[in-house]
Amino acid sequence: MSEIDWEKYWEELKSKLSPYRKIAWEPQTQEQVTEISDSKFCGMPLLTAEGWPECGNCNEPMQLFVQLNSKDLPEASNTPFGDGILQVFYCVNENSSCEADCDTWAANSKATLLRILPLNTPAQTKVTLTPSSDYPELKITGWEELEDYPDTFELEELGVELSEDEEDFLCEDEVPFSGEKLLGWPHWVQGIEYQSCKICNKQMQFIFQIDSSGNIPYMFGDSGCAHISQCTEHKEQLAMAWACC
């Protein structure tokens, strides 16, 4: 494919894939101290009277990975998880083996916590226990809109026939987008792994992607990628799962 005009080739391929195009938004960040309810990576989250969430295995405070305030999301995203503040906590305690013991790669691990707080949640400012990890606080200052397309696994499931060259191009060009993003298509590492709701067993909706060593200085296994999902019917049902190379 070295003699092919890559840009023209991609435009032609995008035309073929246009029925499956989705819009994703990449967070734009800046390292700074944020307000409690701001959208952010790491830093101080909005807390309830119960205090900082603790790991169900080692009982240490878990690291905030991401907090998304529905008021800060792109208008065109239509508040994908509803009104509220989505939070993802993850145990990164280096003095324990919670990642292995609690299968943090799988949904519903007791070493992770996902929740959506109401926008009017009173802020708990007196906190005695915080994570020992010192991850930089990044405020999400905006969103860059991206055109996202499914990977070869998804396309096969959708019944789209690709040539060998087209498959190679999509793999080499990292389609869909890796890195952190809101909506779009999940960047699968090992294959399609949509989660199912614990209540209705229906496939959950992909909401947000967290990649290794991006806005968060943490690696999921060997360069893994995590995906946050929600049941469209049972909004309180959230899941995070990751896979690595």
Image (cartoon, rainbow, N blue to C red):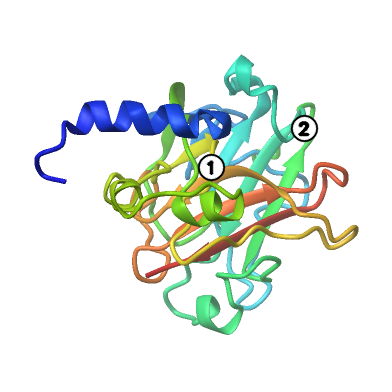
Residue drawn 54% across and 78% down? 98
Which of the numbered marks, if any, corresponds to residue 185?
1
Question: Which quarter shows the C terminus?
Answer: bottom left
Residue drawn 76% across and 39% down? 117
Which residue is more in the foreground, 60 or 14? Answer: 14
Q: What element carries label 2?
A: loop
Provide residue 9's location: percent of width, then percent of height.
Answer: 27, 32
Provide residue 168's location: percent of width, then percent of height.
Answer: 29, 53
Provide residue 228's location: percent of width, then percent of height.
Answer: 61, 50
Q: How many labels does the image show?
A: 2
Residue extending farthest to the top is: 75
Does 16 sit left or right of 172 as displayed? right
Residue carrying label 2: 122
Residue 9 visible in the current orientation? yes
Q: In the rendered image of this protein, does residue 172 appear above or below residue 75? A: below
Q: Residues within 10 Å of mark 1 (few under 14, many from 20)?
A: many
Q: In the rendered image of this protein, does residue 112 appear above or below residue 185? A: below
Q: Is mark 1 on a helix, strand or loop?
A: loop
Residue drawn 69% across and 43% down? 47
Which residue is more in the foreground, 9 or 206? Answer: 9
Residue drawn 65% across and 38% down? 46
Of the image marks 2 and 1, the number of the one nearer the N terminus: 2
Does 168 sit left or right of 67 as displayed? left
Q: Give the image quarter of residue 105.
A: bottom right
Residue 64 visible in the current orientation? no
Q: Give the image quarter of residue 195.
A: bottom right
The amino acid at mark 2 is Pro
The amino acid at mark 1 is Trp
Which residue is more in the foreground, 153 or 236? Answer: 153
